[in-house]
Amino acid sequence: MRPIENLPEPPRGPAGPGGLYLRPLDLAHGAAPAPGPADRLLGGGPARFRRVEAVLRSPERIVAFSGPVDDLRDWALAAGRLEAFDAAMLALTRRRRPLFGKPWSRPLVMGVVNATPDSFSDGTGRFSAGAAVSRAHALIEAGADIIDIGGESTRPGARPVGRAEEIDRAVPVVEAAAGFGVPVSIDTSKAAVMRAALAAGASMVNDTTALAGDPESLGAVARAGVPVVLMHMRGAPRTMQDDPRYDCAPLDAADFLAGRIAACARAGVSADRLVVDPGIGFGKTAAHNAAILARIGLLHGLGVPVALGASRKSFVAEASRGEAAADRLAGSLALALGAAGQGVQVLRVHDAAETLQALALRRAVLDAL
Protein backbone atom coordinates (compact mmCIF):
# COMPACT_ATOMS: atom_id res chain seq x y z
CA MET A 1 0.00 0.00 0.00
CA ARG A 2 1.48 3.33 -1.06
CA PRO A 3 1.92 5.80 1.80
CA ILE A 4 0.50 9.33 1.85
CA GLU A 5 3.38 11.78 2.19
CA ASN A 6 2.62 14.76 4.44
CA LEU A 7 4.03 18.01 3.01
CA PRO A 8 4.62 21.14 5.12
CA GLU A 9 3.09 23.35 2.42
CA PRO A 10 1.27 22.97 -0.92
CA PRO A 11 3.44 21.92 -3.88
CA ARG A 12 4.25 24.71 -6.28
CA GLY A 13 3.41 24.84 -9.96
CA PRO A 14 0.74 22.91 -11.88
CA ALA A 15 -0.62 19.95 -9.95
CA GLY A 16 -0.51 17.59 -12.91
CA PRO A 17 -2.87 14.67 -13.56
CA GLY A 18 -4.44 12.70 -10.75
CA GLY A 19 -7.19 12.90 -8.18
CA LEU A 20 -7.89 15.62 -5.61
CA TYR A 21 -9.52 14.75 -2.30
CA LEU A 22 -10.41 17.09 0.59
CA ARG A 23 -10.77 16.31 4.29
CA PRO A 24 -12.21 18.86 6.76
CA LEU A 25 -9.89 19.51 9.71
CA ASP A 26 -10.31 20.79 13.28
CA LEU A 27 -14.07 20.37 13.27
CA ALA A 28 -15.88 22.53 15.83
CA HIS A 29 -18.81 20.60 17.30
CA GLY A 30 -19.76 22.51 20.42
CA ALA A 31 -21.18 25.94 21.18
CA ALA A 32 -17.74 27.57 21.05
CA PRO A 33 -15.81 29.06 19.40
CA ALA A 34 -18.47 31.29 17.93
CA PRO A 35 -19.00 30.81 14.18
CA GLY A 36 -17.11 33.30 12.02
CA PRO A 37 -17.13 34.35 8.37
CA ALA A 38 -14.39 31.82 7.56
CA ASP A 39 -16.44 28.88 8.85
CA ARG A 40 -17.81 26.28 6.47
CA LEU A 41 -20.58 23.94 7.60
CA LEU A 42 -19.88 20.24 7.12
CA GLY A 43 -22.92 18.78 5.43
CA GLY A 44 -24.92 21.90 6.24
CA GLY A 45 -24.08 21.73 9.95
CA PRO A 46 -23.89 21.64 12.85
CA ALA A 47 -20.16 20.78 12.66
CA ARG A 48 -18.04 23.48 11.04
CA PHE A 49 -14.49 23.84 9.83
CA ARG A 50 -12.03 26.44 8.57
CA ARG A 51 -9.14 24.26 7.44
CA VAL A 52 -8.89 21.33 5.06
CA GLU A 53 -6.36 18.71 4.12
CA ALA A 54 -5.87 18.25 0.38
CA VAL A 55 -4.67 14.88 -0.87
CA LEU A 56 -3.28 14.58 -4.39
CA ARG A 57 -2.86 11.16 -6.00
CA SER A 58 -0.86 10.78 -9.18
CA PRO A 59 0.74 7.69 -10.73
CA GLU A 60 4.04 8.74 -9.14
CA ARG A 61 3.13 9.68 -5.55
CA ILE A 62 0.42 10.59 -3.07
CA VAL A 63 0.88 13.78 -1.08
CA ALA A 64 -1.15 15.62 1.54
CA PHE A 65 -0.94 19.20 2.76
CA SER A 66 -3.28 21.41 4.76
CA GLY A 67 -4.24 24.99 5.46
CA PRO A 68 -7.14 27.45 5.68
CA VAL A 69 -9.80 26.90 3.02
CA ASP A 70 -9.17 30.25 1.33
CA ASP A 71 -5.41 29.65 1.18
CA LEU A 72 -5.85 26.26 -0.42
CA ARG A 73 -8.32 27.70 -2.88
CA ASP A 74 -5.61 30.18 -3.94
CA TRP A 75 -3.26 27.22 -4.39
CA ALA A 76 -5.90 25.42 -6.49
CA LEU A 77 -6.25 28.47 -8.74
CA ALA A 78 -2.48 28.63 -9.28
CA ALA A 79 -2.22 24.86 -9.80
CA GLY A 80 -5.02 24.68 -12.34
CA ARG A 81 -7.26 22.73 -9.97
CA LEU A 82 -9.85 25.38 -9.07
CA GLU A 83 -12.80 23.57 -10.64
CA ALA A 84 -11.95 20.32 -8.83
CA PHE A 85 -11.35 22.17 -5.55
CA ASP A 86 -14.66 24.02 -5.69
CA ALA A 87 -16.53 20.82 -6.57
CA ALA A 88 -14.91 19.06 -3.61
CA MET A 89 -15.82 21.92 -1.27
CA LEU A 90 -19.39 21.85 -2.52
CA ALA A 91 -19.58 18.14 -1.71
CA LEU A 92 -18.23 18.76 1.80
CA THR A 93 -20.73 21.49 2.57
CA ARG A 94 -23.78 20.09 0.72
CA ARG A 95 -26.64 19.80 3.20
CA ARG A 96 -27.30 16.21 4.27
CA ARG A 97 -30.95 15.27 4.39
CA PRO A 98 -31.97 14.11 7.90
CA LEU A 99 -32.26 10.34 8.20
CA PHE A 100 -35.81 9.46 9.28
CA GLY A 101 -36.24 13.10 10.25
CA LYS A 102 -33.58 12.85 12.97
CA PRO A 103 -31.31 15.92 13.30
CA TRP A 104 -27.56 15.57 12.92
CA SER A 105 -26.92 17.12 16.35
CA ARG A 106 -24.96 13.97 17.25
CA PRO A 107 -24.07 10.79 15.39
CA LEU A 108 -27.05 8.47 15.05
CA VAL A 109 -26.58 5.09 16.73
CA MET A 110 -27.50 2.01 14.70
CA GLY A 111 -27.84 -1.04 16.95
CA VAL A 112 -26.73 -4.43 15.60
CA VAL A 113 -29.04 -7.46 15.79
CA ASN A 114 -27.60 -10.68 14.40
CA ALA A 115 -30.32 -13.16 13.43
CA THR A 116 -27.61 -15.76 12.80
CA PRO A 117 -25.97 -18.63 14.67
CA ASP A 118 -22.43 -17.66 13.64
CA SER A 119 -21.87 -13.92 14.10
CA PHE A 120 -18.28 -13.00 14.96
CA SER A 121 -19.42 -10.88 17.92
CA ASP A 122 -22.02 -12.99 19.66
CA GLY A 123 -22.42 -16.23 17.73
CA THR A 124 -23.24 -19.22 19.89
CA GLY A 125 -23.87 -21.87 17.24
CA ARG A 126 -27.62 -21.52 17.91
CA PHE A 127 -30.26 -19.16 16.53
CA SER A 128 -33.40 -17.99 18.28
CA ALA A 129 -35.76 -15.47 16.71
CA GLY A 130 -37.09 -14.67 20.17
CA ALA A 131 -33.63 -13.85 21.45
CA ALA A 132 -32.99 -11.62 18.42
CA VAL A 133 -36.25 -9.75 19.01
CA SER A 134 -35.33 -9.31 22.67
CA ARG A 135 -31.95 -7.99 21.58
CA ALA A 136 -33.65 -5.44 19.33
CA HIS A 137 -35.93 -4.32 22.15
CA ALA A 138 -32.98 -3.95 24.53
CA LEU A 139 -31.11 -1.79 22.02
CA ILE A 140 -34.15 0.45 21.59
CA GLU A 141 -34.51 0.75 25.36
CA ALA A 142 -30.83 1.75 25.45
CA GLY A 143 -31.55 4.59 23.02
CA ALA A 144 -30.57 3.22 19.60
CA ASP A 145 -31.88 5.39 16.76
CA ILE A 146 -32.02 2.56 14.18
CA ILE A 147 -32.03 -1.23 14.48
CA ASP A 148 -29.99 -3.16 11.88
CA ILE A 149 -31.04 -6.80 11.47
CA GLY A 150 -29.03 -9.32 9.48
CA GLY A 151 -29.74 -12.98 8.72
CA GLU A 152 -26.39 -13.89 7.17
CA SER A 153 -23.02 -13.66 8.88
CA THR A 154 -20.43 -11.57 7.07
CA ARG A 155 -17.55 -12.36 9.41
CA PRO A 156 -14.25 -13.33 7.74
CA GLY A 157 -14.48 -16.89 6.43
CA ALA A 158 -18.27 -17.05 6.62
CA ARG A 159 -20.06 -19.19 4.06
CA PRO A 160 -23.04 -17.68 2.22
CA VAL A 161 -26.56 -18.86 3.01
CA GLY A 162 -29.46 -19.20 0.59
CA ARG A 163 -32.15 -16.58 0.12
CA ALA A 164 -34.88 -18.71 1.69
CA GLU A 165 -32.84 -19.44 4.81
CA GLU A 166 -31.83 -15.81 5.21
CA ILE A 167 -35.47 -14.71 4.86
CA ASP A 168 -36.59 -17.32 7.40
CA ARG A 169 -34.03 -15.99 9.88
CA ALA A 170 -34.35 -12.26 9.41
CA VAL A 171 -37.89 -11.42 8.33
CA PRO A 172 -39.74 -12.59 11.49
CA VAL A 173 -37.31 -10.51 13.56
CA VAL A 174 -37.82 -7.51 11.28
CA GLU A 175 -41.59 -7.86 11.52
CA ALA A 176 -41.52 -7.96 15.32
CA ALA A 177 -38.94 -5.19 15.73
CA ALA A 178 -40.77 -2.89 13.30
CA GLY A 179 -43.57 -2.68 15.85
CA PHE A 180 -41.28 -1.12 18.46
CA GLY A 181 -41.48 2.34 16.89
CA VAL A 182 -37.85 2.71 15.77
CA PRO A 183 -36.70 2.47 12.12
CA VAL A 184 -35.47 -0.99 11.16
CA SER A 185 -32.71 -1.66 8.61
CA ILE A 186 -32.22 -4.97 6.83
CA ASP A 187 -28.56 -5.97 6.52
CA THR A 188 -28.39 -8.04 3.34
CA SER A 189 -26.89 -8.16 -0.15
CA LYS A 190 -29.77 -10.11 -1.70
CA ALA A 191 -32.63 -8.36 -3.49
CA ALA A 192 -35.15 -11.03 -2.49
CA VAL A 193 -34.30 -10.56 1.18
CA MET A 194 -34.52 -6.79 0.79
CA ARG A 195 -38.00 -7.05 -0.73
CA ALA A 196 -39.24 -9.48 1.92
CA ALA A 197 -37.86 -7.43 4.80
CA LEU A 198 -39.20 -4.14 3.41
CA ALA A 199 -42.63 -5.75 3.03
CA ALA A 200 -42.37 -6.87 6.68
CA GLY A 201 -41.72 -3.35 7.94
CA ALA A 202 -38.06 -2.53 7.37
CA SER A 203 -37.47 1.04 6.20
CA MET A 204 -33.76 0.95 5.28
CA VAL A 205 -31.25 -1.32 3.55
CA ASN A 206 -27.64 -1.89 4.64
CA ASP A 207 -25.65 -3.72 1.95
CA THR A 208 -22.07 -4.88 2.39
CA THR A 209 -21.71 -5.03 -1.41
CA ALA A 210 -23.00 -1.48 -1.97
CA LEU A 211 -25.86 -2.84 -4.13
CA ALA A 212 -23.39 -4.58 -6.44
CA GLY A 213 -23.83 -8.15 -5.17
CA ASP A 214 -27.19 -8.83 -6.79
CA PRO A 215 -28.21 -7.43 -10.19
CA GLU A 216 -31.74 -6.83 -8.87
CA SER A 217 -30.72 -4.85 -5.77
CA LEU A 218 -30.51 -1.41 -7.36
CA GLY A 219 -33.98 -1.78 -8.83
CA ALA A 220 -35.42 -3.10 -5.56
CA VAL A 221 -34.11 -0.12 -3.60
CA ALA A 222 -35.10 2.37 -6.29
CA ARG A 223 -38.68 1.10 -6.29
CA ALA A 224 -38.89 1.03 -2.50
CA GLY A 225 -37.63 4.59 -2.10
CA VAL A 226 -35.84 3.81 1.18
CA PRO A 227 -32.44 4.95 2.49
CA VAL A 228 -29.51 2.61 1.90
CA VAL A 229 -26.03 2.20 3.36
CA LEU A 230 -23.41 1.49 0.71
CA MET A 231 -20.43 -0.33 2.21
CA HIS A 232 -16.99 -0.94 0.77
CA MET A 233 -15.79 -4.54 0.76
CA ARG A 234 -12.89 -6.06 -1.16
CA GLY A 235 -13.86 -9.60 -2.17
CA ALA A 236 -16.45 -11.77 -0.39
CA PRO A 237 -16.62 -12.71 3.32
CA ARG A 238 -15.35 -16.26 2.77
CA THR A 239 -12.07 -15.10 1.19
CA MET A 240 -11.86 -11.34 1.79
CA GLN A 241 -9.00 -11.61 4.28
CA ASP A 242 -6.81 -13.67 1.94
CA ASP A 243 -4.05 -11.14 1.26
CA PRO A 244 -6.13 -8.01 0.46
CA ARG A 245 -4.14 -5.31 -1.37
CA TYR A 246 -4.68 -1.64 -2.12
CA ASP A 247 -2.85 1.17 -3.85
CA CYS A 248 -4.01 3.49 -1.02
CA ALA A 249 -6.81 2.11 1.16
CA PRO A 250 -8.54 5.41 2.12
CA LEU A 251 -8.56 6.70 -1.46
CA ASP A 252 -9.44 3.35 -3.03
CA ALA A 253 -12.44 3.00 -0.70
CA ALA A 254 -13.55 6.56 -1.51
CA ASP A 255 -13.23 5.93 -5.26
CA PHE A 256 -15.22 2.68 -5.07
CA LEU A 257 -18.01 4.35 -3.09
CA ALA A 258 -18.07 7.29 -5.52
CA GLY A 259 -18.62 4.76 -8.31
CA ARG A 260 -21.48 3.13 -6.43
CA ILE A 261 -23.11 6.51 -5.76
CA ALA A 262 -22.96 7.14 -9.51
CA ALA A 263 -24.48 3.72 -10.19
CA CYS A 264 -27.30 4.50 -7.78
CA ALA A 265 -27.97 7.81 -9.52
CA ARG A 266 -28.24 6.02 -12.88
CA ALA A 267 -30.73 3.59 -11.33
CA GLY A 268 -32.87 6.37 -9.87
CA VAL A 269 -31.63 6.21 -6.26
CA SER A 270 -31.05 9.79 -5.15
CA ALA A 271 -27.93 10.78 -3.20
CA ASP A 272 -30.29 12.12 -0.52
CA ARG A 273 -31.10 8.50 0.32
CA LEU A 274 -27.50 7.27 0.54
CA VAL A 275 -25.05 6.71 3.39
CA VAL A 276 -21.51 5.37 2.87
CA ASP A 277 -19.49 3.05 5.10
CA PRO A 278 -15.76 2.28 4.52
CA GLY A 279 -16.20 -1.33 5.66
CA ILE A 280 -13.67 -1.72 8.47
CA GLY A 281 -12.50 -5.32 8.55
CA PHE A 282 -14.04 -6.24 5.18
CA GLY A 283 -11.14 -7.25 2.98
CA LYS A 284 -8.62 -5.14 4.90
CA THR A 285 -5.57 -5.71 7.05
CA ALA A 286 -4.98 -3.88 10.32
CA ALA A 287 -2.81 -1.38 8.44
CA HIS A 288 -5.58 -0.75 5.90
CA ASN A 289 -8.13 -0.25 8.68
CA ALA A 290 -5.88 2.18 10.54
CA ALA A 291 -5.19 4.21 7.39
CA ILE A 292 -8.91 4.47 6.61
CA LEU A 293 -9.84 5.44 10.17
CA ALA A 294 -7.10 8.07 10.28
CA ARG A 295 -8.62 9.82 7.26
CA ILE A 296 -12.26 8.72 7.37
CA GLY A 297 -13.17 12.39 6.96
CA LEU A 298 -12.19 12.08 3.29
CA LEU A 299 -15.50 10.28 2.74
CA HIS A 300 -17.39 13.52 3.43
CA GLY A 301 -16.18 14.51 -0.02
CA LEU A 302 -18.75 12.10 -1.46
CA GLY A 303 -21.51 14.49 -0.45
CA VAL A 304 -23.54 12.03 1.67
CA PRO A 305 -23.59 11.02 5.36
CA VAL A 306 -20.80 8.72 6.54
CA ALA A 307 -21.32 5.64 8.70
CA LEU A 308 -18.79 3.57 10.62
CA GLY A 309 -19.16 -0.02 11.76
CA ALA A 310 -16.05 -0.76 13.82
CA SER A 311 -17.74 -2.12 16.93
CA ARG A 312 -16.03 -5.24 18.35
CA LYS A 313 -14.11 -5.76 15.10
CA SER A 314 -10.90 -7.79 15.14
CA PHE A 315 -8.97 -4.58 14.43
CA VAL A 316 -9.63 -3.57 18.06
CA ALA A 317 -7.87 -6.71 19.27
CA GLU A 318 -5.09 -6.45 16.69
CA ALA A 319 -4.28 -2.91 17.84
CA SER A 320 -4.51 -3.90 21.51
CA ARG A 321 -3.92 -7.22 23.31
CA GLY A 322 -5.86 -9.75 21.28
CA GLU A 323 -9.08 -9.44 23.26
CA ALA A 324 -12.10 -11.61 22.48
CA ALA A 325 -15.04 -9.90 20.79
CA ALA A 326 -16.97 -9.55 24.06
CA ASP A 327 -14.03 -7.68 25.61
CA ARG A 328 -13.60 -4.98 22.95
CA LEU A 329 -15.97 -2.34 24.33
CA ALA A 330 -13.30 0.20 25.32
CA GLY A 331 -11.59 0.02 21.94
CA SER A 332 -14.93 0.22 20.14
CA LEU A 333 -15.82 3.39 22.06
CA ALA A 334 -12.42 4.90 21.26
CA LEU A 335 -12.98 4.33 17.55
CA ALA A 336 -16.53 5.70 17.76
CA LEU A 337 -15.38 8.89 19.48
CA GLY A 338 -12.52 9.32 17.03
CA ALA A 339 -14.95 8.99 14.13
CA ALA A 340 -17.35 11.46 15.73
CA GLY A 341 -14.45 13.90 15.93
CA GLN A 342 -14.09 13.62 12.15
CA GLY A 343 -17.79 14.28 11.63
CA VAL A 344 -19.05 10.72 11.04
CA GLN A 345 -22.84 10.84 11.20
CA VAL A 346 -23.86 7.20 11.87
CA LEU A 347 -22.26 4.69 14.23
CA ARG A 348 -23.19 1.01 13.85
CA VAL A 349 -22.59 -0.56 17.28
CA HIS A 350 -23.34 -3.52 19.51
CA ASP A 351 -23.30 -1.44 22.72
CA ALA A 352 -25.82 1.36 22.26
CA ALA A 353 -26.09 2.58 25.87
CA GLU A 354 -22.34 2.83 26.32
CA THR A 355 -21.85 4.56 22.97
CA LEU A 356 -24.56 7.12 23.71
CA GLN A 357 -23.05 7.80 27.14
CA ALA A 358 -19.63 8.37 25.59
CA LEU A 359 -21.14 10.73 22.99
CA ALA A 360 -23.05 12.63 25.68
CA LEU A 361 -19.88 13.18 27.72
CA ARG A 362 -18.01 14.28 24.63
CA ARG A 363 -20.72 16.80 23.85
CA ALA A 364 -20.83 18.10 27.43
CA VAL A 365 -17.09 18.76 27.41
CA LEU A 366 -17.16 20.43 24.00
CA ASP A 367 -20.04 22.68 25.05
CA ALA A 368 -18.03 23.81 28.07
CA LEU A 369 -15.17 25.20 25.96
Image: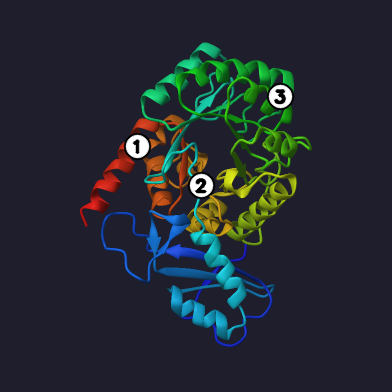
Q: Residues within 10 Å of mark 2 (few under 14, many from 20)?
A: some
Task: Reply above or below: 338 against 67.
Answer: above
Foreground disc of the pair 1, 2: 2
Res. 109 image quadrant: top left
User: To which residue does mark 3 refer?
Assistant: 161
Marks 3 and 2, Cα distance to the nearest angstrom?
34 Å
Note whether 195 is above or below 69 in the view shown. above
| Circle 3: residue type | Val
Quarter of the image for residue 282 reads top right
> Where does residue 311 sit, x and y in percent of width and height?
46, 38
For the residue pair 7 and 174, the one nearer the viewer reads as 174
Residue that carries the numbered disc 2 in the rendered image = 97
In this rendered view, identify the residue nearer to me: 266 or 344. 266
**Which image quarter holds the N terminus?**
bottom right
Name which of mark 1 and mark 3 comes first in the sequence.
3
Residue type indicated by callout 1 = Leu
| Residue 59 image offset from top left, x and y in percent | 69, 72
Residue 274 visible at all: no
Q: CA distance from mark 1 to mark 2?
A: 22 Å
Q: Which amino acid, by three-letter code, is at mark 2?
A: Arg
Image quadrant where one finds the C terminus:
bottom left
Residue 43 or 22: which is nearer the viewer? 43
Give the labeled residue for mark 1.
356
Q: Please state if 173 lies on the left or on the right of 51 as rendered.
A: right
Q: From this view, report whether residue 289 is shown above or below residue 220.
A: below
Give SS at disc 2.
loop
